[in-house]
Amino acid sequence: MTIVEGIVLKERSVGEQDKFIDILTKESGVIEVSVKGARKINGRSGSSTQLLAYSRFCVERRGNYLYLNSAEPIHIFYGLRGSLTKVSLASYFAEVMRFCIKPEAQNGDIMRLLLNCLHFLENGERGESMIKALFEFRLMSEIGYMPDVVACRGCGTYEPEELFFCISDGGFYCADCFENESGSNYMKVKLPVLSAVRHIVLSDFDRLFNFRVSEETQQRLSALAEFYLLTHLERSFGTLDFYKTIKS
C-alpha cells in the first residue's frame, strides 16, 4: 500500500460501477487509479474521488495498474461549483495539467501552483483573468518554457514603454528595435504587462500572488499568457473554448 496526496484532474466511468481517476501528485506526476464500485461509494470517500478534489489516497499496485483502497478528503473546493465560469476555468487548469505533466515527473511546485490557483479562484480573492494568466505563465516556466524577459534583445533596454513580445521564442524587442513584416507571432504590449510577466515567472513562490495590476493590464496579460501557452503546447483545449464561450 502507498499513501499519496493529490488533486483529481479527471474521472471517467468504466462499466456500470467503476471509474478511473487521474491524480496530480507531488512525487509521481499524474497517476491513473482504478476505483472499483465508485458509484456505490458515498459520503467523505465518494467526494474524495470527484473532479478537483484534493485528497489523501491509499493505493496498491496490482500488475500494471493502481487500485484505490481508500481515500479521505483534504479540501474539496465546493466553492467552485457555485459558479459555472469558476468550475469551467478550474477544469481548463486540470486539462492542461493532464497534458503537460507526465507520470513519474517530480515537481512539488506544480501541484502547489494548482492548489493556490484553485484556492484564490474559489475565494474570489483575485480576478479570473489574473489567476488564469498567472497559472499559464508560471506553469510554462515550470515545465521548461520560461520566457526571456530580462531585456530587449536588440539594445538591452530593461524598461521600454512599449514592446513587442515574441510568442514563439519568448523574448521581446522595444519599439525602436522591432522589425517584423507579418507581425503574426508577436503581441504589442506596454511596460506594466512586461512587469507582471516578470513577477509571475521570476518571483519566489511565496510572493507569487502578491501583486496587483489595472483591469486593462490584466486583460492584456491574460491574452498574452493564453497565446503563449497554446503556441508552445501546440494544441487547443476544449475546456478553454467552453470557458471563453460562457464568459463572453
Image: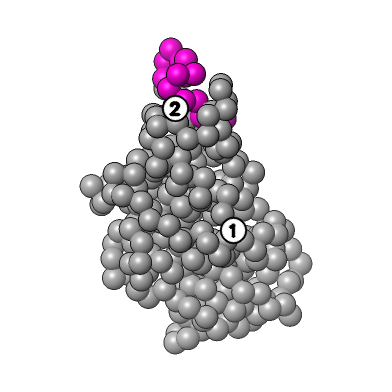
Q: Which residue is mark 1?
A: 204
Q: Main structural element of the magenta stretch: helix, strand or loop? A: loop
- Give the left or right position of residue 39, taking residue 1 as reference: left
| Residue found at the very far left of the displayed protein | 248
Which stretch appears magenta?
A: 169-183
Q: Residues within 10 Å of mark 2 (few under 14, many from 20)?
A: many
Secondary structure found at label 2: strand
Tell me the quarter of the picture where residue 164 sits.
top left
Q: Is residue 163 above or below residue 3?
A: above
Secondary structure found at label 1: loop
Residue 166, how many percent across, how many down?
50, 28
Residue 236, how many percent across, how many down?
45, 40
Does the stretch in magenta take in 193? Answer: no
Amino acid at circle 2: Phe
Q: Nearer the viewer, residue 117 or 207?
A: 207
- Give the left or right position of residue 37, taking residue 222 as reference: right
How many numbered tags mark residues here?
A: 2
Amino acid at circle 1: Asp
| Residue located 52% across and 80% down the image | 74
Tell me the quarter of the picture where residue 76 sits.
bottom left
Q: Which residue is mark 2?
A: 164
Label whose residue precedes the other's in the sequence (1 or 2): 2
| Residue located 61% across and 61% down the image | 109
| Residue found at the very far top of the displayed protein | 181
The label on residue 157 is none
Dividing the image into 4 quarters, which one contains the N terminus? bottom right
Q: Nearer the viewer, residue 210 or 238?
A: 210
Q: Is residue 183 above or below residue 130?
A: above
Does the stretch in magenta take in 176? Answer: yes
